[in-house]
Amino acid sequence: MNELDSLKFSNRFAELPEDLFHKQNWTPFDKPKLIHFNEDLAKQLGFPKNLDPEDLVPYVNGNKSFKNSSPLAMAYAGHQFGSWVPQLGDGRGILLGQLQTKDGLMDLHIKGAGKTPYSRFGDGRAVLRSTIREYLCGEAMHYLNIPSSRSLIMIGSDEPVFRETTEFGAMMVRVAKTHVRFGHFEYFSHNNKSEFIPILLDHVIENYFPILKDSQDSYTDLFEMIVNSTAKLIAKWQAFGFAHGVMNTDNMSILGETFDFGPFGFLDEYDPGFICNHSDHGGRYAFNNQPSIGLWNCHALAAALKDYIEIERTKSIINNYEQVFYDELTALFRKKLGLEKNEADDLKLVEELLSWMQKNKMDYTNTFRSLSKNEDNLFKDKEGETWQQKYLHRLSKEKTSPLKRQEIMEKANPKFILRNYLAQEAIQDAEASDFTKLNNLLEVLKKPFEENSVFEDFAKESPDWGKKLEISCSS
């Protein structure tokens, strides 16, 4: 018996009414080739030990099938850049099903699978460039302790795919707790299919929030948990300098996971107005707009659920979003500054530091890391020295030892992040079939808070060309 046949797949989404999806297989590549296999994630998912990843390739490519996987493309809609689009759906993705793990159900989803009924005018493929970026960023986020989808395996091909230039097709298996998005509920609400909303709400509660099954107001309770997890997720993005780039409602997970990576970017120099998506001409999804867009998206979800959630309580939940966000953000920044006590002006202290960083075009990640190391040469101007004195005064109110404080800060301020130029260099080499940089970068991103003298260069500020990379949605 093939070891992979022993995996206990299910697809609980496939048991729902067929208005929610389209059952289908996907389009294989003629000559698939293994690019990378995520051994750590495979272990977590319960894949056989000592699995030869080459044996997994035909299953990912669509030449073989997992028992009980029941592949399907999901139907959903969403607001894209604030404008309503009535049908989006899995235009290039196939939900294989779920595996039960010690951390709960985990979805396995093929991305780059070819055409589905939701592909519109697209070819349903993904390219190696975007697949590598998503693979890298899922790992980067996970090891920064930011909830995120990840990738199990990536395969490439010789199949030409036409974007701005001719590229090559690739697929990956995306792993997430769920692929249910805000846009699923919007799809039914806006398309006169609202009778399916309670069916999907019950599915979500049954599989992901069983604690709510006996609640007197389970749908409103669920909405509150979605809003709060969204606020906390975006606070983590802000604390680590991550810009998503395309916060459309169809890219928002109902479980508060970072989801659907496109033209993302981590801050180089601290610039609150940073726009990582060169298609975002109005800056709707600029770095400093992310918290308010998260709230906007929660409003859109509330509108879709309006007939099933208690209105007055919903208003209160929405109004509390900002408090949840700032509580989480302040807690994260206290750790970044090595503070354990709560003082009223702590966020103001952070804001003054960020203002100084912006004026001096300081690298966001490296400045906080230098602060962790208590480097004396960080503040060289009068404004910086003034802030440093305020910081030292604030530290005088703490009982934590300097050694303990440094330990707290080093666990909150990464040495290594996924800088765009590092991803770009890994992509360029991979397109020439050299995966050394890709493999090295993945290893470094697994331990972002630890010193690593072998890969010290990965922590350097981005070169000028690397700060000016334009990343598009095309993938």
Image (tube, rainbow, N blue to C red):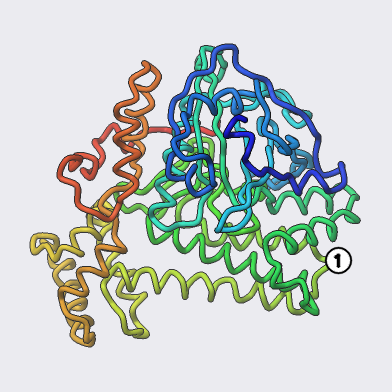
Which residue type carries mark 1? Asp
Q: Residue at x 56, y 40 (%)?
A: 174
Measured as percent of width and height from the top left, residue 61 is found at: 60, 23
Measured as percent of width and height from the top left, residue 207 is found at: 71, 59
Q: Height in image: 188 above or below 419?
A: below
Q: Which residue is drawn at 77% across and 54% down?
A: 185
Quarter that holds the N terminus: top right
Q: Quadrant of residue 226?
A: bottom right
Q: Height in image: 89 above or below 242?
A: above
Q: Height in image: 8 above or below 374?
A: above
Q: In which quarter of the image is residue 122?
A: top right
Tag 1 residue: 307
Quarter that holds the C terminus: top right
Pick the residue in front: 283 or 207.
207
Residue 214 seen in render: yes
- Label 1 residue SS: loop
